[in-house]
Every structure is written in C-alpha cells, then in structure tokens.
Image (cartoon, rainbow, N blue to C red):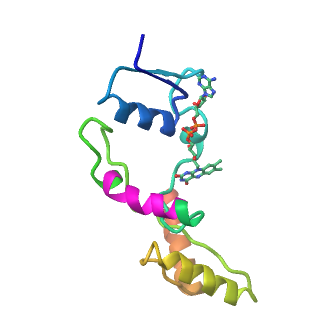
Amino acid sequence: MSDFLILGGGMAGASAGFFLADRGSVTLLEKEDALGYHSTGRSAALFTENYGSPPIRALSVGTRPFLEAPLPGFADHKLLGPRGVLMLALPGAGAVFAAVLAEGRKTAPELREIGMAEATALCRSCVQAASPGR
Ligand SMILES: Cc1cc2nc3c(=O)[nH]c(=O)nc-3n(C[C@H](O)[C@H](O)[C@H](O)COP(=O)(O)OP(=O)(O)OC[C@H]3O[C@@H](n4cnc5c(N)ncnc54)[C@H](O)[C@@H]3O)c2cc1C
C-alpha cells in the first residue's frame, strides 16, 4: 500500500515520483520493461526556452535553475549541456523570421540571426565532429 500511485515512468511520472517521495511512499508503475521507453527516451533531447506556447515557455524558463543544479539524488549526470539548434527561413519569409526571432528572444535572449557562411561553417564542424576525417 502506497500513499501515491503513479502510472507511467516517463519524465513526467518519474519527476512527480521524485518530488512526492518527500511527502509519502510512492509506487510508480511502468508497463514497459524500462523507464523512459516512449516519448522521453526517444524524443526529449532539447531544452529550448523559446519553444511552444507562452505557458510552456514560462515553465521552461522557470525550470532552468533546477536543470542546471538538480537536487541531490535526482540524476547521476549533468542534465544540460550546450547543443546548437539551427532554424532556417526560406527566401521571402524574412518578416515571419524576424517576428519569430523577436518573440523567441523574449525568453531566450541568446538567440541570434546568422548568415549562410556561418551556418555552413557550423554544419561542416558538426559533420566533422560526427565523422572525423571527412
Ligand atoms: C518527435 C518529438 C520530439 C520531441 N522533442 C523534445 C525535445 O527536444 N525536448 C523536450 O523537452 N521535449 C521533447 N518532446 C516532448 C517530450 O518528449 C514529451 O513531452 C515527454 O517525453 C513526455 O513525457 P511523459 O512522461 O509525459 O510521457 P512518456 O515519456 O511517453 O511516458 C509515459 C509512460 O507511461 C507509460 N504508460 C502508459 N500507459 C500506462 C499504463 N496504463 N500503465 C503503466 N504505464 C503506462 C508508457 O509506457 C510510458 O513509459 C518531443 C516529443 C516528440 C514526439
């Protein structure tokens, strides 16, 4: 018998379990063989403060301090590390791009516009890092 029963061991269920454990006993049931088997294990790869609707962005911004310095026992490795994201705008979409950039900067001030030369150099360095010698 537990105080809390959580169905699903993705990042939502596992995080809820971690925080509820201060308040009582927790049982977390996962139907697969491993935790994080579905969306969490396959998709959750980026922490982007300029992604999603305003409430999602606010939650992301508010989460950063915890992700940078999680409570002891939450994870045995670093949760965040630098990972570049390149967003492309098609020719003629300059106004939309500028609006998206301005909106994104409200929650991620480090966002910046780059040109073709820098984008090409970034892609080359990624390919070289992934396949040394190419
Ligand atoms: C293509 C894609 C890319 C994404 N990229 C990112 C990203 O870059 N960054 C980011 O932060 N987020 C990203 N997301 C979103 C993120 O992956 C999800 O929001 C998050 O993983 C959801 O976590 P969850 O715990 O709610 O669900 P899940 O990880 O799906 O966990 C739910 C768990 O519940 C279990 N379950 C279901 N029913 C039962 C049951 N009856 N009994 C027991 N267990 C059950 C499932 O087996 C599963 O393990 C992406 C999502 C997608 C689809």
98 up-or-down from 88: above or below: below
Q: Could you say which is closer to the camera, residue 44 or residue 20?
A: 20
Q: Residue at x 76, y 89 (%)?
A: 92
125 up-or-down from 29: above or below: below
Q: Residue at x 56, y 86 (%)?
A: 117
- Most common SS among magenta residues: helix
- Quadrant of the rendered image holding ligand 1: top right
**For residue 12, side relative to residue 78 (left or right):** right
Percent of width and height locating residue 70? 29, 47
Q: Residue at x 42, y 77 (%)?
A: 110
Q: Is residue 61 magenta?
A: yes
Q: Is residue 25 magenta?
A: no
Answer whether residue 134 is visible to the viewer in this image.
no
47 up-or-down from 125: above or below: above
Answer whether residue 47 is visible to the viewer in this image.
yes
Percent of width and height locating residue 51? 56, 64
The span shown in magenta is 56-66
Label count reads 0
Q: Residue at x 42, y 10 (%)?
A: 1
- Residue at the top extreme, as displayed: 1
Quadrant in which the C terminus is drawn = bottom right
Percent of width and height locating residue 28? 47, 23
Percent of width and height locating residue 116? 60, 85
70 up-or-down from 121: above or below: above
Kindly indicate the quadrant of the structure image that contains residue 30: top right
Kindly indicate the quadrant of the structure image that contains residue 72: top left
- Residue at the left extreme, as displayed: 72
